[in-house]
Image: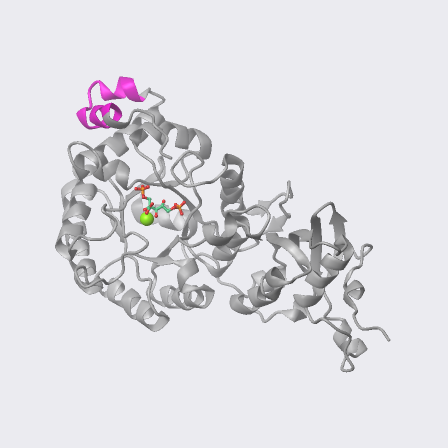
Amino acid sequence: MKTEWYLDFVAPSYRPAREDLIVLFRVEPANGISMREAVGRVASESSIGTWTTLTTMTPEKRRLMAKAYEIKGRWVKVAYPLDLFEAGNMPQVLSSIAGNIFGMKAVRNLRLEDVRWPPELIKSFKGPQFGIDGIREIFKVNDRPLTATVPKPKVGMSSEEHAQAGYEAWVGGIDLLKDDENLSGQRFNQFERRAAQSLKLRDRAERETGERKSYLINVTAETREMLRRAKFVKERGGEYVMVDILTVGWAGVQSLREECEDLGLAIHAHRAFHAAFTRKPEHGMSMLAIAKIARLVGVDQLHIGTAIGKLEAPREEVLALQRAIMNRNVKSGRQILAQEWRAIKPVFPVISGGLHPGLIPDIIEMFGKNIIIQIGGGVWGHPDGGRAGAAAVRQAIDAAMEGVSLEEYAKERGELRAALEKWGRIRPK
Ligand code: CAP
Ligand code: MG
């Protein structure tokens, strides 16, 4: 009597259909388990199977079986029939392709590396409301990176201090004030007070500088509260909400995306928590897969790393992330599946983490100018304060865009000179 049917999910000669969802997995079988047995278990457990044969199976149900169809070393591609998934329901898709399988005894390690999203599923998600062109339209700035800063210390300021820091940074030259990922509505910095006061000073900074300014206010909270906070931001004249996409979860992000469609608010996505499962190449889920989900669900801006800052991110990985969220069509590559994005708009890449003016030319040289550069400590650690730190950031960008060395540019610009004297070109650890 046959007690298991895992190998029924292995179909090396299968050629995926256009409407299949395809996942690229890295699979490390447990001792005593062959690669075929391991990939059969992955395809089975993530589609319709379980540990043993079933009396309830019918030919009709078998058409929902996933198929492991390409095994190369530790890498396998699994094709999933479209009917396995509910259109527009990201949590359900991930409960399937990124659910139980990570805990199976049959695999010592398992990593979900990339997902090729089929056209039918892509159509069921909103994608970014504004995209890069829409964001640049708000600021009327097309010839340089946009800039953002987070007041530091990241939490601890009162609403008044936070708003004042925002004013200093805006008049110093920064485009976007940003809340830190763990700032929401603490007792000493209530959300409504911070929003109201910061947006009032934003208006003043716009009048004084003649430049558009905005505020990425963090609405991260229980979902209904997030929607309430988004409405509050709209009433106060804000253009954005910021959300920690992984700690609120994809259902929360989808609800916020729906609300922001009605309110006409852009979404800035922070990815705090990602390194809990993206950092190890042998187990978990790649930031590439996360970034593509974020684009599908519909954020307008997304942190993707710096390659040279304080947080771990190999240069090639960050560049691949940038292509995945910006390009209309992504070519297949090493551990990357080809992806057509059809009508889904591009997402603005945010380069952030351990940056300061001395690193700006390297960043622009690596990622180009169609990026947002976020600098926290590199502004608020400036010897002459946040306003000077903001000015130094803009001066470093102007130098890079004019092809002039920072040192040359700093001869006539004290704020940049002071930043270079403090940090030079150091790359934080
Ligand atoms: C950067 C930051 C951002 C990180 C997040 C921080 O501050 O505000 O959260 O960039 O990482 O809290 O560290 P600094 P990533 O500019 O002072 O480093 O962008 O890789 O998601
Ligand atoms: Mg932060």
* Residue 5 image point, x, y percent: 79, 69
**Exactly how many numbered labels are in the figure?**
0
Q: Quadrant of residue 299?
A: bottom left
Q: Residue at 16% across / 56% down in the picture?
A: 159
**2 or 186: nearer the eye?**
2
Is 228 situated left or right of 366 in this image? left
**Which quarter of the rendered picture does the N terminus lie within?**
bottom right
Is 409 situated left or right of 276 in this image? left
Judged by its main secondary structure, the magenta piece is helix
Q: Is residue 269 above or below residue 141?
A: below
Q: Quadrant of residue 33?
A: bottom right
Q: Is residue 337 visible?
A: yes
**32 or 43: nearer the eye?**
32
**Which quarter of the rendered picture does the C terminus lie within?**
top left
Q: Is residue 399 above or below residue 281?
A: above
Is 396 situated left or right of 95 in this image? left
Q: Is residue 414 above or below residue 331?
A: above
**50 or 410: nearer the eye?**
50
Q: Residue furthest bottom?
A: 56
* Residue 135 image point, x, y percent: 36, 49
Scheme of image coloration: one colour
* Residue 407 image point, x, y percent: 28, 19
* Residue 312 image point, x, y percent: 45, 40
**Span colored in magenta:** 406-421
Please tell me whether residue 205 belongs to the stretch shown in magenta: no
Q: Is residue 18 visible?
A: no
State which image quarter holds ligand 1: top left
Please tell me whether residue 407 belongs to the stretch shown in magenta: yes
Q: Residue furthest front?
A: 31
Q: Residue at 59% across / 63% down in the picture?
A: 121
Is 232 situated left or right of 99 in this image? left
